[in-house]
Each structure stands twice: as structure tokens, then as C-alpha cells.
Image: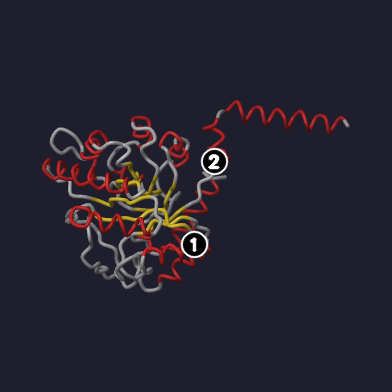
Amino acid sequence: MTNRRNFIKQSGAVALGSLAMGPSALEFLGKKQYDLGVQLYTLMAVIDQDTQGTLKKLADIGYKNIESAFSRQGGFYGKKPKEFASTLEGMGMKWRAHHVLGAPFKLPPGTKMPTDEKGEPIKIPPMKNLKENMQELVDSVAEGGVEYLVCANIPTNTPEEVAEAVQILTKSGEACKKAGLQLVYHNHDWEFKTIGDSTPYEVFLSQIPADLMKMELDLAWTIKAGVDPVTLFKKHPGRFPLWHVKDIDKDMLTLKPVGDGSIDFPRIFKNAKKAGLKYPFIEHDNPKDAFDSLGRSMAYLKKNILK
């Protein structure tokens, strides 16, 4: 009886102690779970060769949420919106977000393009963009039941381009809102470079209403730019429902599987509630072995973050 009483007392103390820590601490301890997702750009080298098999492998690893990207097959990896959504659901996954271009875009000099298994650059057909094909893109994504339409990038090299980007993104945000979608902007490192009197990133956050556009923070590119994600979360709480969970070496050049690089993910995830995080998507640009990287990344997060 004494042992039983002690056990009850100890159990109650643990419960009260957990409550005293507050909601954010409880969430970090695992009470708030995030189903891990993957950005399909990670699999650009293989997914168009065997879409069904690639998606099945992701489901087998344990991924639950999908963020789609560009496909050489056209459409959504050769499928219509409802067909692609149905394919994912049949494998136990959900289509949450899709990447599109903001405007015709020239990559900065030295940018590495995705390569196939032979190391050859992948030729991507001309892609539609929000400047020229906004309503068509919004309608197709809405048809698939997706929650977020993500602007993957948009030209921001001059003050004029930044001003035009604000107009395009604001108009796109309004169209998304009418269609039941949320527009989101995905960053690289260059949006944090000063253009004129400010950075494009701060211009977007200050000039585009939060209900029209939120942000998908790419953790690796943000840190490469010398910006602290947690500082952004505190300055703009609730504005970051999507993250690209990506790691980078100390050299700020070499991308790594999550946990193999230099990023302090526990500190960042402790601030997930303040950020407004809903879906974390693991991404690794041009990995040597995408499935190995995605498996190791998931294992790290489950052991160290989502335990």
C-alpha cells in the first residue's frame, strides 16, 4: 500500500510539474507533435522517372505531409490536381503545399541546378508564374485541396523589382484568399541583402498584410544570410506556418542531412509556437542519396526534437 501511495504522489508531482512549465514547454516535450513533411525538390533527380515508387518510399520512411515542386512531366508530376491528391492519400500522406514561381526568374551566377543520377543538369520546361499565370495557378492548386500556395522565389535585385514583387504578391494573396488558400513566400539568402533602404524580406513583411501572405522560412538559407530565425519569430510572431528544415555545414556552403550540420534545431523548435509553425518540411537540395538523407533527417528529428 505504501508503495502504491508513493507512486500516486510521485505521479501527481510529475503531472503538476509539467503543468507548471506552461504550454510551450509541454509542446516541446512532445505533447505538440508535428507530422513531418518533405519538399519534393529533394527528389528532383528521381521523382519524374518513377513518381509512384518515389512517393511510396517516402510513405515507407514515415513522411506524412507533402510539399510539391516543379516537374518535368508537367502538371503535378504528370497528374491532375485531384489525381495527385488522391495518390498521396492512398499512401497515407497529405498534400499540404505547392511551390510556384513569382515571375520569370534568372538564377544568380554560380547557382547549382539540380542534377540527375548521372550528374547531368536536369532540364526543367518553362514554368508558369504568378505574374503571368496567377489565376490558373491558384485555381489548379485549390482544385487539389492544398492549403498553401508558396512563391518559391521572385526577382528582387533592384528597388524596382522589389516594388513589382510587392504588387504581384499582394494581388496573388488576394486571389488565394478568395480561393480558400494561403499565399506563403519562401526565402533564399538573397532576400536578406539590402536593396535600396531595406531588405526585400523586411519589405515583404511590412508592406504585404499578414492575412494575404505568410512566410515559409528556409532555416539553412536564413542562417547563411546571417539572420537568426528566432529573432524573426519574435519580431513577427505567427507569420511562419511553414519551415524548410534544412541543415548546412559551418562553411555555410555545404548542405547536409538534418542533424549533420551546424544548425541548432532544438533552440529553433523551442520557438515553434511563437513562429506559428504548422508544417515542417524537410529539404536537402541536390543530395547524393535523397532517401538516405531524408531517412537520417527524420531519425534525428524524432530522437532530438519530436521525442
Residue annotated with mark 2: 32
Helix, strand or loop under label 2: loop
* Helix, strand or loop under label 1: helix
Residue 232 at x, y percent in the picture: 34, 34
Which is more foreground, mark 2 or mark 1? 1
In which quadrant will I find the N terminus? top right
Depth check: 209 or 151 in front?
A: 209
Pointer 1: residues within 10 angstroms few (<14), some, or many (20+)? Answer: some
Circle 1 residue: 89
Q: Nearer the viewer, residue 283 or 131?
A: 131
Which residue is located at x 34 percent, y 65 percent? Answer: 76
Residue 234 appears in which quarter of the rendering?
top left
- In the image, 68: left or right of 112? right
Q: Amino acid at mark 2?
A: Lys
Residue at the image position 57 percent from the left and 38 percent from the top: 29
User: In this picture, is 289 found above or below 274?
Assistant: below
Vertical arrangement, residue 280 with respect to residue 91, above or below: above
Q: Quadrant of residue 223?
A: top left
Farthest residue toward the front? 178
Q: Position of residue 83 (x, y in %)?
A: 41, 67
Residue drawn at (55%, 48%) of the image: 303
Callout 2 crowding tier (Cα within 10 Å): few <14, some 14–19, many ≥20: some
- For badge 1, the amino acid type reads Glu
